[in-house]
Structures are given as structure tokens and as C-alpha cells.
Image (spheres, helix red, strand yellow):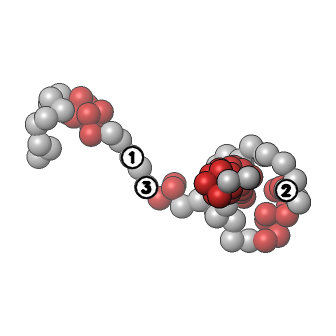
Amino acid sequence: METNQLNEDRIKGALYGMFIADALAMPVHWYYDREALIRDYGWVTGYLAPKNPHPDSILWRSSYSPRNQMSLTRNKSPNTPAN
């Protein structure tokens, strides 16, 4: 096998491995309580759907509205600065 082909295969393998690991870790990411992690997912051996809401999420503390949505609710055009 040529060196260039070998390097290309290694790069592809690394990228695929990264994508697979990220997908497997997604639902259990940001768990800080190991007992809750085991309770909710057990031993992760495949792809799982995330719990909703995430038990350790802090997103309830914030809110988000797109700029154009806020402008519409204030009867202003999206390019008008908010007061």
C-alpha cells in the first residue's frame, strides 16, 4: 500500500472514529452524577436517545429568542435596533 493511501486511510479512520464516539457519548454527556448516569443509561453499548430534559441541564436558567422574532413581537423591522 502506498504511503499516501495509508495516510488517507488513517485520516478517514480517525474521523469516522471521532464521529462514532461523539454520537455514542451525546446522550450521556454532561452527567456529573455517576449514579444518575448508571440509573438513566446503564452501560452504554449502542446509540441511545437523550433524556429530555437533561437532569443536570442549566438551560432552564436562560431563554433564547432569535433577533428577528423579538423584533416582530415589538412591531419593529429586524434591522431596527432594540430600545
Mark 3 Cα-neighbour bin, 10 Å: few <14, some 14–19, many ≥20? few
Q: Do the residues labelled 3 and 1 touch (CB within 8 Å)?
A: yes
State the CA–CA distance, disc 2 to disc 3.
30 Å
The percent coordinates of residue 59 (x first, y second) are 51, 56
Q: Provide residue 13's location: percent of width, then percent of height.
A: 70, 53
Tag 3 residue: 62
- What is the number of the mark on residue 44? 2
Query: Disc 2 to disc 1, how far (Cα)?
Result: 32 Å
Measured as percent of width and height from the top left, residue 2 is found at: 68, 53
Q: Which residue position is annotated with label 1? A: 64
Q: Residue at x 59, y 59 (%)?
A: 57
Q: Which of marks 2 and 3 is nearer the N terminus?
A: 2
Of circles 2 and 3, the one toward us is 2
The earlier-in-sequence mark between 2 and 1 is 2
* The quadrant where residue 80 appears: top left
Does the rendering let one see residue 27? no
Tell me where residue 6 sits by quadrant.
bottom right
Query: Compared to 30, does 64 lie above or below?
Result: above
